[in-house]
Image (tube, rainbow, N blue to C red):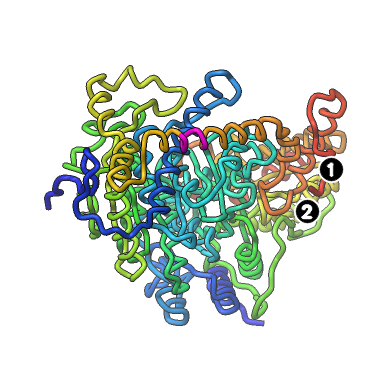
Amino acid sequence: MTIAEPNQVIAQDGSVNGYTPDLTNSQLLHCYRTMQSVRAFDDICMKLQRSGRIGFSIPNKGVEACQVGAASALEKTDWIFPSYRDFGMALYHGVSPLEMMHNMFGNDRDSARGRQMPVHFSFVKPIHFVSISSPIGTHIPQAVGAAYAMKLRGEKNVCLTSFGDGGTSSLGFHSGMNFAAVWKAPVVFLCQNNGYAISCPSEEQTCSESYAIKAVAYGMPGVVVDGNDLLAVRQAVKEAVERARTGGGPTLVEAKTFRMGGHSTSDDPTRYVPKELVESWAKKDPVARFERFLASRGLWTPEKGAAIYEECIAEITAAVSEAEKTPPPTLESIFSDVYAQIPPHIRRQGQAAFDLAARVGDASAGGGKFPL
Amino acid sequence: MPTLTLVQAVNDALKTAMRRDPTVIHFGEDVGPKGGVFLASDGLTKEFGKARNFDTPLSEDGIIGTAIGMAMNGLRPVAEIQFQDFIFPAFDQIVSEAAKLRYRSGGQYTAPMVIRTPYGGGIRGGLYHSQSGEAYFCHTPGLKVVVPSTPEDAKGLLLASIEDPDPVLFLEPKALYRQLKGEVPEGFYTTPLSTLRTVRTGKDVTVFCYGAMVPVCQKAAEQAAEKGIECLIVDLRTLLPLDEEGVLEAAKQTGRVVVVHEAPRFCGFGAEISAMIAENIIEYMEAPVARVTGFDTPFPNTLEHHYMPDARRVLDAIEHVGKF
């Protein structure tokens, strides 16, 4: 099998080819606004990190169409097993920037109560956006297990799991792909091939002619799409979702894209990405391409685009104010949620920490009382 | 009350759980029609069908990774790892995922699941069919580690583990699978986790042990009794979270303690018991704590009977602390 050129729906000039108009104008604008919201969130988080107000962030510039195009193919009853560069999927389905900002500050209203690094989100509403972990690929077989549960109960829901090009080398990718195919589990595997696993380029990651072709060996379809083309990603993921929903089993979708910034705020991509490569991808910017498409349908002008971005900035700036003034978690958050019930040894350690904090007066112990 | 072997009691527990709760499913390598390499899942596919008891591809990472996803989404998976020695590809899933899921999501996602796996020596399994890896897992907050030593406890503790809202590693002493027979209550019952079992009472020396070391310690205690030393034997049953108060209470009763396990000594479970005693009740102690353990070497094949603590070595330690 040879994987052909990536599927494309929106050409660079914004004209469309092979597009089934299944989104209303307001849905198209929601997709656009979500991409702008991701961009605004990134812009603000970069400033927060550089000024020392948050510790860490993960930029998404360049890959927004993968996230939003894929999310647009899912229903709220589906589950997302994301990587750490996927929060546009949660925004698309209605998670508020404020909830995310609580995580960025690790405060007491963060769903994980400050136990994880920033960007390691966890949401159950309005869609299951499963708690993100840092080890690569571990979430892939978990998505397959959750999908098995859906299948066993006869539900028509699916799991979408997303990972990068580096993730395809992980143990979890192999076991997840294999188990899903054997079980015909309703899973969509989305590989966002952004060219680099932190600094390791694709040619040092795999000898395969593409990532999608790996699907063939597992016995499932593999497709490649232009990951900077929101509608192409949506179309491919939608087809895969329909296949999964109707009992046809899993699909691997490879979305070819490019991360226009560092892996994280701790990374300097100029050490490993050639300048010319960045320049060539800058011309394919997914947001600009979608703007040209919207403009061709009379839905976008530069003024309207700027206004939407400013709206997003305002919303996220308000979220920053709110999150920054929310207090940090109290000491008991260290000791709770390890088990359903706090065992005596952890309770004793917590009590000792509370007593010390009370004596020294350097931290809030949350009343210092168990049970929580 | 029927008399069952330990592995039959495991089988009985699985059937009991699957009959009363349709969300309980069991899977692993060769656990389907074959019924598992030790026949722990004998008859499950026949009774519950392939969707609830099935063979998986040969990947421990896949078995535990998928079990976590199932547990997150409403099932109560019981996953078998064929030998505990083979669990390490799934170490990441157990330690970084299952054990931390509740914590890192503030309770939004949890992994109520059981990992069953035969552990320990005594079957001429050599390096890779004999290990006791409990210490690796006892160092993992969020996980529970359970080790039965009788058929009745095997059933009661396994049913309690399946009911438990947290992930449980259930270590089955394979040396005892068919060596021991005992009466096992019919139907559903649970043996509470994090409780100790007094195997034998005695006023002179307290012996802490678990799993396949329990009958070894019983034999040593009988020999010690002939020499005038009466042992209190405590089966720990749940290593994490441990009933620490119960352990300290039992240690105080005699002031002389021997801890026995098959696993290597360095950073083994005995070290934790010893430290606990030193930190909390040193003033009650009449003798240093003695540890009888596997050696700090890999597990040998031909000479496994020299590697594993036997009654002779346990008795030696009992006499040492008893006469100290």
Whether residue B293 appears in this view of the structure is no
Please check the rendered image and state whether residue A310 is part of the magenta-colored stretch, yes or no. Answer: yes
Determine the residue located farthest toward the left in the rendered image.
A2
Numbered tag placed on residue A118 in the rendering: none
Circle 1 SS class: loop
Relative to residue B223, is residue B229 drawn left or right?
Answer: right
Up-down relation of residue A234 to residue A228 (above or below): below
Front-most of A78 and B83?
A: A78
Residue at image location 37% in from the left, 59% down from the top: A187
The residue labelled by disc 1 is A369
Quarter where residue A166 is shown: top left
Please check the rendered image and state whether residue B27 is part of the magenta-colored stretch, yes or no. Answer: no
**Residue B320 picture location, percent across and down:** 73, 39
Front-most of A240 and A207?
A: A240
Residue at image location 25% in from the left, 30% down from the top: A283
**Residue B5 picture location, percent across and down:** 56, 72
Instruction: Tell me the amino acid under the disc marked 2.
Output: Leu
Whether residue A105 appears in this view of the structure is yes
Q: Chain of mark 2?
A: B
**Residue B263 picture location, percent across and down:** 55, 44
- Which callout, 2 or 1, points to the residue nearer the camera? 1
Q: Chain of mark 1?
A: A
Relative to residue A42, is residue B156 drawn left or right?
Answer: right
**Residue A84 picture location, percent across and down:** 45, 39
Q: Which residues are drawn in magenta?
A: A307-311
Numbered tag placed on residue B232 in the rendering: 2
Instruction: Tell me the amino acid under the disc marked 1.
Output: Lys
